[in-house]
Image: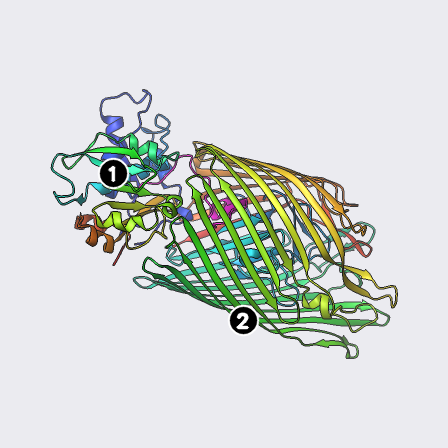
């Protein structure tokens, strides 16, 4: 799937250039907001077995409290994700067993280390923005390509964690890795 | 799948309800509910917000500056030297033959950038005869093919080996996977400069991409005015050709690049001034094949084979008497294998272990008169081996503290082994504050030119020359209150010993290199960067250097005490972007301090299929100079003065 290159960055300027929309909406799509929206929408295509995520329970997402993504994700807290309420928590220092979804930045990865694989096997969906994230634990890698976002899916942790991904999600992925 | 789809449609889907859904167009805009837009729409949207401060790819704990391809186009950068011009603490100069960079107070005229390591995707560009860091039009890669340039300050020998005394320039080429289709670029500049590039991208199968590019450049030349020597006509011409090929297929990637530049010399020390028979030629060929394999959760293994070749030939018209053409040549050939393994198996540690084996199969230099009679002076042929082992660990001792330790052992055939350690600490004191401290050691073995160039009464080699060493420390504080602003203050101190300096041996009057220099360079620099909501960016830095020549050889007289730089990128109406670059350099010896400004206007044209940029260099026509290659025979090298360049890059 082709990605945007340096020459395509002004396309959104076109979108705002029609008389109706400019200058009333000097819309800036912030990176953190877009990233959080994409993470939320990815989760809409994920299903956990009832033994791991019971009906009606909250879906807990843990993310390191760094500036940007954590704030944007917290704004989406309380929304409905296929019958589960989204709860966003700061990543606790110890291995977070209560987290159903984990967003791991590359800096945090060395600290969590081997426990990530164990967490993933126990039913935690791990997302990251780092291409070097280990293939046996990180199911989804979200990266910026030019000014847009793309994501890759790794099937190995998906299989071991018994999490189900909709085929539509796999079609939208840039790359699906075994 | 989504490349041809216009962003207008999905963007309207998000924005239209806002405009048509009852609220008045004049009311304050509310943020759209991005999360409700649908995943396929979101993947089509572009980030237009302020968070555009480029994050560096390198893991180095030292301060680094990153310049992206977009910034290079918006500022009208033509060469790697132009890119480094606005980097904090650097002084870029040119003697109209090559471009040079002085870093953090170290600036020696005639230095072939041997103390800065230049890498293309991690491969050395510095050759095996002069160990030169090529930065100008002699650099074998067209800047249009570069995705980003990272300048990493400080001693880089712990990771990269020889020559990284004051910094590492890492040039990252465009990845094969980025869709390009076909591209043609045309540039016109001063001195009847014409540049043409054609680039093609061929996706061979899924996962396999080939990128091919060819560039031709011709400069008819300008008249150059040398104060006190007159004007040289029709001698400053240049002809260049560059080829690039990159194949990526899953875990394998192969790169081949070739550059060939011929240049007329307008005023070279000892040559007949202004005669068109003086010229030189630089030819590079670099190839590498890399395999990067993930070993499950154990780590990543990278194996790389590389090969390089650099040929230099210069013809100098000298009036001994009689009038003769003297030819100087150098042939560099090197190849090697580099393997490294990085792992995170040990909780909290990021460990890299590696080895590099390099054979410098040719380090040949020759000098002879070719006209009117053939007289040989030098025909020196050498070869050498280099072996290295390195290890580096980044340990996240606490959530906010990362400690790093690195060590590299380098052995060059015929000299003592070098141990280059590096220690670092990065402390994320809070969300906004990061403090870094790095202490490192670096070395540079004498190059073939310093060791073996001789054969006449004027020059002789010094086979007993030893390596130069530098030990440095840098402490930096970085303040990032949000994703759009960054303030960085760095204090550094570098102690250089065994600096190879060319001096006249009183015994026979010949010029020879000796490890006679000792210098202490210290200073402070401050940089402020801010990205504006509308897409603009401003970056300003100031530096103050104290340079002490402890050996009393006058090595500090060409270092400017103060530097100030400004970069401003501002989107204007109708899709145009303004790029402004200003540089102010203090006095360097006999060369007065000066300030230069370059301005570029760029815009997408032809229904967004092309990028047009118009640049004016030296906007105020300061006609500044740089210190020349030789303080007696060429004390200053004049710049071009105000010049215009127009460039059109088309994609189809």
Q: Nearer the viewer, residue B294 or B187?
A: B294
Secondary structure mostly taken by the magenta-highlighted segment of the chain: loop
Q: Which mark is residue B335?
A: 2
Task: Report the side of B516 relative to B82 (left or right).
Answer: right
Q: Name above or below for residue A67 compared with residue A112.
A: above
Residue tagged 1 = A40
Which quarter of the rendered picture does the C terminus of chain B lie within? bottom left
- The x and y percentages for residue B481 are 46, 31
Asked whether residue B626 is drawn in magenta, I would say no
Q: Quadrant of residue B621?
A: top right
Identify the chain of the residue marked 2, using the numbered disc in the image. B
Stretch in magenta: B45-74
Q: Could you classify mark 2 by the number of other residues whose Cα lies within 10 Å: few (under 14), some (14-19), or many (20 or more)?
A: some
Residue for point 23% across, 45% down: A124
Q: Nearer the viewer, residue B426 or B601?
A: B426
- The x and y percentages for residue B415 are 66, 68
Q: Nearer the viewer, residue B320 or B60?
A: B60
Number of numbered labels in the structure image: 2
Q: CA distance from mark 2 to mark 1?
A: 49 Å
Residue for point 68% across, 68% down: B448
Q: Quadrant of residue A127?
A: top left
Q: Could you classify mark 1 by the number of other residues whose Cα lies within 10 Å: few (under 14), some (14-19), or many (20 or more)?
A: many
Q: Nearer the viewer, residue A67 or B72?
A: A67
Q: Is residue B164 visible?
A: yes
Identify the chain of the residue marked 1, using the numbered disc in the image. A
């Amino acid at each position: 799937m082709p990605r945007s290159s340096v020459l395509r960055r002004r396309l959104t300027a076109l979108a705002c250039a029609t008389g109706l929309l400019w200058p009333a909406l000097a819309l800036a799509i912030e990176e953190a907001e877009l990233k959080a929206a994409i993470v939320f929408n990815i989760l809409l295509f994920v299903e956990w077995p009832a033994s791991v995520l019971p009906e009606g329970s909250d879906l807990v997402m843990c993310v390191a409290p760094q500036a940007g993504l954590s704030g944007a994700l917290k704004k989406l807290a309380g929304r409905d994700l296929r019958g589960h309420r989204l709860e966003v928590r700061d990543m606790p220092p110890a291995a977070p067993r209560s987290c159903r979804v984990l967003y791991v930045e590359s800096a945090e990865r060395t600290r969590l280390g081997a426990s990530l694989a164990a967490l993933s096997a126990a039913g935690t969906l791990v997302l990251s923005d780092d291409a070097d994230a280990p293939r046996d634990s990180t199911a989804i890698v979200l990266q910026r390509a030019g000014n847009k976002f793309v994501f890759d899916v790794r099937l190995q942790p998906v299989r071991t964690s018994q999490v189900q991904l909709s085929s539509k999600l796999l079609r939208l992925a840039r790359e699906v890795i075994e | 799948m989504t490349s041809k789809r216009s962003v207008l449609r999905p963007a309207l889907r998000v924005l239209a309800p806002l405009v048509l859904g009852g609220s008045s167009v004049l009311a304050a805009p509310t943020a759209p509910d991005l999360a409700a837009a649908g995943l396929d729409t979101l993947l089509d949207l572009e980030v237009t917000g302020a968070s555009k401060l480029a994050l560096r790819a390198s893991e180095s704990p030292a301060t680094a500056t990153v310049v992206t391809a977009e910034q290079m186009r918006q500022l009208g950068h033509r060469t790697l030297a132009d890119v480094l011009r606005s980097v904090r603490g650097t002084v870029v100069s040119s003697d109209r033959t090559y471009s040079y960079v002085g870093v953090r107070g170290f600036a020696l005229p005639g230095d072939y950038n041997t103390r800065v390591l230049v890498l293309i995707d991690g491969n050395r560009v510095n050759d095996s005869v002069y160990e030169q860091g090529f930065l100008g039009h002699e650099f074998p890669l067209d800047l249009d093919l570069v995705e980003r340039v990272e300048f990493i300050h400080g001693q880089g020998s712990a990771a990269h080996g020889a020559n990284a005394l004051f910094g590492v320039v890492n040039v990252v080429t465009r990845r094969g996977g980025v869709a390009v289709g076909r591209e043609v670029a045309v540039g016109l500049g001063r001195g009847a400069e014409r540049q043409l590039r054609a680039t093609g991208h061929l996706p061979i199968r899924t996962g396999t991409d080939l990128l091919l590019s060819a560039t031709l450049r011709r400069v008819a030349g300008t008249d150059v005015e040398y104060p006190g020597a007159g004007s040289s006509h029709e001698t400053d011409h240049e002809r260049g050709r560059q080829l690039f090929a990159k194949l990526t297929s899953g875990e394998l990637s192969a790169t081949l690049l070739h550059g060939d530049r011929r240049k007329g010399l307008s005023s070279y020390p000892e040559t007949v001034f202004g005669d068109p028979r003086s010229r030189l030629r630089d030819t590079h060929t670099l190839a590498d094949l890399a395999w990067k394999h993930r070993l499950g959760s154990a780590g990543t293994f990278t194996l790389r084979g590389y090969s390089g070749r650099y040929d230099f030939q210069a013809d100098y018209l000298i009036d001994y008497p009689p009038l003769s053409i003297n030819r100087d040549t150098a042939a560099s050939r090197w190849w090697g294998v580099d393997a490294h393994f990085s792992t995170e198996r040990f909780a909290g540690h990021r460990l890299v272990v590696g080895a590099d084996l390099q054979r410098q199969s040719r380090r040949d230099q020759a000098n002879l008169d070719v006209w009117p009679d053939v007289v040989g002076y030098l025909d020196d042929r050498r070869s050498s081996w280099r072996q290295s082992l390195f290890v580096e660990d980044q340990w996240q001792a606490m959530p906010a503290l990362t400690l790093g330790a690195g060590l590299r052992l380098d052995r060059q055939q015929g000299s003592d082994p070098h141990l280059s350690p590096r220690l670092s600490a990065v402390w994320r004191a809070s969300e906004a504050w990061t403090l870094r401290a790095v202490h490192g050691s670096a070395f540079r073995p004498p190059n073939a030119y310093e060791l073996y160039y001789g054969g006449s009464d004027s020059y002789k080699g010094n086979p007993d020359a030893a390596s130069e060493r530098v030990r440095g420390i840098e402490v930096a504080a970085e303040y990032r209150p949000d994703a759009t602003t960054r303030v960085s203050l760095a204090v550094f101190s570098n102690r250089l010993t065994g600096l190879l300096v060319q001096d006249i041996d009183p015994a026979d009057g010949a010029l020879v290199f000796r490890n006679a220099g000792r210098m202490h360079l210290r200073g402070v620099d401050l940089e402020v960067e801010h990205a504006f909501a509308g897409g603009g960016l401003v970056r300003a830095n100031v530096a103050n250097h104290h340079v002490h020549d402890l050996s009393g050889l006058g090595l500090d007289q060409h270092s400017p005490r103060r530097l100030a730089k400004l970069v401003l990128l501002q989107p204007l109406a109708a899709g145009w972007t303004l790029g402004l670059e200003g540089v102010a350099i203090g006095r360097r010896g006999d060369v007065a301090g000066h300030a230069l400004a370059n301005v570029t206007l760029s815009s997408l044209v032809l229904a967004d299929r092309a990028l047009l940029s118009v640049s004016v260099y030296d906007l105020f026509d300061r006609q500044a100079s740089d210190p020349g290659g030789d303080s007696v025979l060429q004390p200053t090298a004049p710049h071009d003065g105000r010049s215009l360049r127009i460039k059109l890059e088309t994609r189809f």
